[in-house]
Amino acid sequence: MTLLTFENNTPAPSMKEAGVRRTTRCDELPRLTSTVPREYVHRSSVAEVFLTGYERIGDDTFLLTGQWPRAHTFFISADGTGHDLVQVGETVRQAGLLLCHAEYGVPLGHNVLLWSLGFKADLEQLLIGVGPTDLELIATCRDFGWKGNRFSGFLEVSVRREGRIAATGSGFFSFVPPAVYRRLRGEYGRLSTAAPAQLPPRPAPILPAEAGRLLPFDVVLAPGDRPGRWLLSPDLTHPILFEHANDHHPGMVLVEAARQAACGTLHARSFRPTAVESSFHNYAELDAPCWIDTEVPHSMNPGIRTVHVTGHQGDARIFEATVTGTIASD
């Protein structure tokens, strides 16, 4: 930098007179849009963070902002015209994690246990527009608090787009310290998606059209031994479903498996899922077969169908879900 000097005690000219442009300080810059810290929502990639900010508007109520990109490699409808229903669930999950860490003091190193996740959407409100989809979320935190070294709480979320409710969701979370998590996982904690070579080979998946997906890479089910049964079979290198290393199949993988199994049961080309309600009972281990079974109850409305989905490993029930959607008329 050139230093300006003036002799004979001549008063220095102003910065304007000297032709020097005033520099704006960082703390004087206008507040610009960015994502929330990726660590708060347990993502490795900033590109997979869908929340941009939050503020408290009540004792346990928060206004969050978010954005979905126009194009996403995974969260997109089968016909390419809309945001994916499961993206609503991922956004609700991120909202819960953000508030637990940023507002309720859960340390970033604690491990999350997802016990339930439910969401439903107006598919018309999920259509992709001419720009990214900006969101406002009203999140209500119920019974958030500590019991010993474990934190838990129930979250309810309303997702709004241009002032209209596009989706709603809820989830029940708990967090445990790393030492407790290591005891919970025991020997299973030594396995990881970061080293897929140590795990059984992946069976060939079903056709994407049967699962309601566009690409084979996105299919998480392999054929079962009878109709209405599949084998959980995701690609462990998938950049979204396994966005970071894990020692078990994440809850969002099981949600996706439920959605794909429902599509396979009701023929994907005519079934459009609009809601998922799921609960998780045990970890889905990486080294054991996880069987996905479906059952279709009788419906009085032929245009609305529901599929009950369960996942088992051995005698253990891993998760259960109810997927509801519409059947397109011929």
Image (cartoon, rainbow, N blue to C red):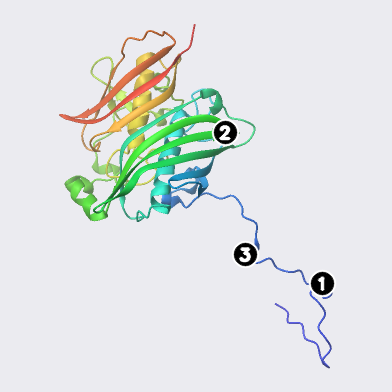
Residue 71 % position (x, y): 55, 35
In the rendered image, the residue lying farthest to the top is: 330
Q: Are marks 1 and 2 in contact (CB under 8 Å)?
A: no
Q: In the figure, residue 306 lies in which quadrant? A: top left
Residue type, numbered disc 3: Cys
Please tell me whether mark 2 sits on a helix, a strand or a loop: strand
Real-space Cα distance between discs 1 and 2? 46 Å
Q: Tell me which residue sits at (80%, 87%) in the image.
A: 6
Residue 227 % position (x, y): 27, 14
Are there few (<14), some (14-19), or many (20+) residues within 10 Å of tag 1?
few
Task: Between label 1 and label 2, give the one nearer the viewer.
Answer: 2
Residue on which the image places disc 1: 16
Q: Is residue 123 above or below residue 196?
A: above
Q: Could you say which disc has been placed on residue 161 in the image? A: 2
Task: Between label 3 and label 2, give the one nearer the viewer.
Answer: 2
Q: In the figure, residue 217 lies in which quadrant? A: top left
Please tell me whether mark 1 sits on a helix, a strand or a loop: loop
Are there few (<14), some (14-19), or many (20+) residues within 10 Å of tag 3?
few
Residue type, numbered disc 2: Arg
Residue type, numbered disc 1: Lys
In this rendering, does residue 68 appear at all?
A: no
Residue on which the image places disc 3: 26
Are there few (<14), some (14-19), or many (20+) residues within 10 Å of tag 2?
some
Q: Is residue 54 above or below residue 170?
A: below
Earlier sequence position, callout 1 versus callout 3: 1
Real-space Cα distance between discs 1 and 3? 21 Å
- Viewer-nearest residue: 103 or 293: 103
Please tell me whether mark 3 sits on a helix, a strand or a loop: helix
